[in-house]
Image: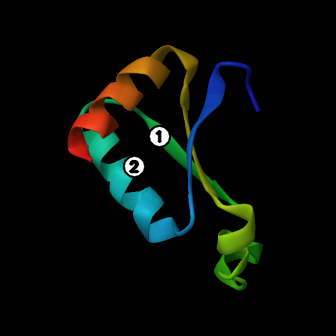
């Protein structure tokens, strides 16, 4: 993974991560979701491994500000 892509936040479900991803993308911040759940075949792994939201390093601070406002 490129050095300019960093972990923004970890969620316990892809649905919660997807909600945050949609919100941030509407605000102009590109987001990538990473999860180790065997391609969706083992969703219970999301509970232990988490679903990671990744953003560009340059967008990290703004993403935190925007998500704090949303929550």
Q: Is residue 12 above or below residue 30?
A: below
> What element does badge 1 sit on?
strand
Image location (x, y in percent) of residue 7: 63, 36
Residue displayed at 65% across by 19% down:
4
Q: Is residue 18 left or right of residue 71?
A: right
* Residue 44 shows in the view: yes
User: What is the CA distance from the residue labelled 1 to the residue labelled 2?
Assistant: 6 Å
Whether the residues at callouts 1 and 2 have beta carbons within 8 Å, the answer is yes
Q: Nearer the viewer, residue 2 or 24?
A: 24
Quickly name the residue at label 2.
Answer: 21
Lower position in the chain sequence, tag 1 or tag 2: 2
Q: What's the coloring here? A: rainbow
Q: Nearer the viewer, residue 17 or 32?
A: 17
Residue displayed at 56% across by 19% down:
57
Image location (x, y in percent) of residue 49: 74, 63
Q: Nearer the viewer, residue 59 or 68?
A: 68
Residue displayed at 70% across by 85% down:
41
Quickly name the residue at label 1.
Answer: 31
Residue displayed at 50% across by 14% down:
58
> What element does badge 2 sit on?
helix
Q: In which quarter of the view is residue 51 placed? A: bottom right
Q: In which quarter of the view is residue 59 placed? A: top left
* Residue 36 shows in the view: no
Q: Quadrant of the N terminus?
A: top right
Q: How many marks?
A: 2
Q: Is residue 60 above or below residue 26?
A: above
């Amino acid at each position: 993974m490129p050095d300019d892509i960093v972990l923004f936040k970890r969620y316990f479900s892809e649905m919660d991560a997807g909600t945050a991803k949609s919100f941030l993308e509407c605000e102009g911040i590109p987001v990538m979701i990473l999860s180790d759940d065997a391609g969706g075949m083992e969703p219970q792994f999301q509970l232990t491994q988490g679903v990671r939201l990744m953003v560009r390093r340059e967008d990290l601070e703004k993403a935190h500000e925007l998500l704090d406002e949303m929550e």
